[in-house]
Amino acid sequence: MDIQIIITDIDGVWTDGGMYYTESGDEYKKFNTSDSVGVILAKAAGIKLIIMTGEESNCVKNRAKKLNIDNCYLGVKDKLKLSKEIASKEGVSLQQIAFIGDEINDHKLLREAGFSACPQSAPEYTKKIVSFVVPTDGGKGAFRDFVFEILRRKNIFEDLFDQLSNG
């Protein structure tokens, strides 16, 4: 498996899909910190990370900044089109891109990515089209477990995990 780029949706993957609003209209999202382990391992493996979401959310931008993920695209209407542009710019094919998403707006890219996945909590119509259903629900470490699966398929998970946990 020659994955060079991981693209991730946010709502329903890094979160439980809930949207929380205060009376004044401020938006909050609950992120699971275990997903940061996936970020650490992907970076250690030299895999580029990209957040791509249809939402315009400062919460997502702030989470990306905290995790030092420089490539964060908000308000994306056509994830496949943007992914093709990124692949061209980076000199990789769509077969070298892994994508995790959960809903119908992710389907075009889920079908075209070299490795695609969705959380266990995704709807059945999404589970039917992906390469792998992560055994974890969105918002409960699904992104981390997606990265673990990629690294296992690349046969580098154990060494990388040992290196980082013993280093």
Image (tube, grey):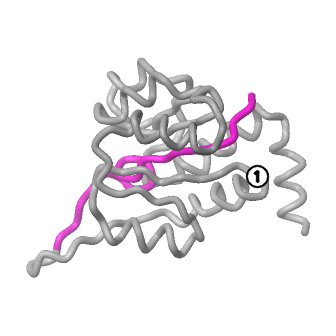
Most frequent secondary structure within the magenta stretch: loop
Which SS class for mark 1? loop
Q: Up-down: is 2 above or below 59?
A: above
Q: Which amino acid does label 1 sit on?
A: Gly
Report the residue at 43% width, 54% height from top: 139
Report the residue at 58% width, 36% height from top: 98
Residue 132 location (% of width, % of height): 56, 27
The quarter of the rendered structure image containing the N terminus is: top right
Q: Give whichever of 105, 160 is nearer the camera.
A: 105
Q: Up-down: is 13 above or below 61?
A: above
Q: Up-down: is 143 above or below 57?
A: above
Residue under label 1, please give it.
Answer: 46
Residue 23 location (% of width, % of height): 9, 78
Residue 140 location (% of width, % of height): 48, 53
The quarter of the rendered structure image containing the C terminus is: bottom right
Residue 115 location (% of width, % of height): 59, 28
- Verify whether residue 17 appears in magenta: yes
Label 1: few (<14), some (14–19) or many (≥20) C-alpha neighbours in 10 Å: few
Left/right placement of residue 38 relative to residue 21 reads right
Task: Give the residues drawn in magenta, as a range.
Answer: 1-21
Q: Give whichever of 145, 94 is nearer the camera.
A: 94
Left/right placement of residue 4 relative to residue 88 reads right
